[in-house]
Amino acid sequence: MMQTLHSIDRIVGFILRTVAITCLVILMFILGGNVIARFTNWFSLGWYDEIIQLSFAWMVFFGAAELWRENQHFRIDWLFYTLPRAKRRVHTFIVALFNILFLSFLMYEGTYLAQKSSALTPILGLPVALLYSCVPISAAIMLVYAIADLFRHSPRHADEVHVIDDL
């Protein structure tokens, strides 16, 4: 069972990294092409802003999900290190609860936003919901990892797990 979960985790990480890196490459090429187009007037990229918005949103949200999965996201750990070692596990557990609440809200509102969006982009005719869909998808992925963190740092499992004391 653990081997299967580990394999799924690696696949999810690969997909998240691939999406974020692909979006970054698309951004580089389209923005570079737009600079050349404006400088030389050889061709026009009137549709580029639609792809830029889509690529940037997907890169940011899927990149955030990958950072969350790897536990590499930005955090302020001043309070964590000012607490005595005995209280750090409780602090980590409470933070995990807040993360779950926030990500649940983000997933719910992101789903609502994507479902209510019926507009199409003006030039390419892409559904705007495609742009918004990265929000609930990435929030759901981060929520799964936040729930895993909650169980990993629960006071009930205090003897079985090591808290991040050496950040």
Image (cartoon, rainbow, N blue to C red):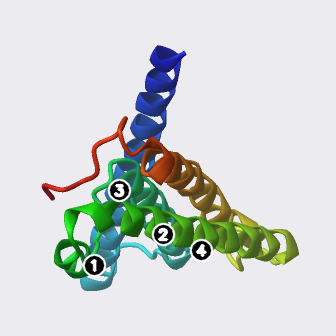
| Residue located 71% across and 80% down the image | 122
Alpha carbon distance from label 1 to label 4 = 39 Å
Sequence order check, earlier mark of 3 and 1: 1
Sequence order check, earlier mark of 1 and 4: 1
Labels 3 & 1 near each other (Cβ < 8 A)? no
Q: Residues within 10 Å of mark 3 (few under 14, many from 20)?
A: some
Q: Residues within 10 Å of mark 2 (few under 14, many from 20)?
A: some
Q: Which dot marks residue 35?
A: 1
Alpha carbon distance from label 3 to label 1 = 31 Å
- Label 4 amino acid? Phe
Q: Nearer the viewer, residue 32 or 164?
A: 164
Alpha carbon distance from label 4 to label 3 = 16 Å
**Residue that mark 4 sits on:** 102
Sequence order check, earlier mark of 2 and 4: 2
Secondary structure under the numbered disc 4 in the rendered image = helix
Sequence order check, earlier mark of 4 and 3: 3
Rendered view: 148 above or below 62:
above
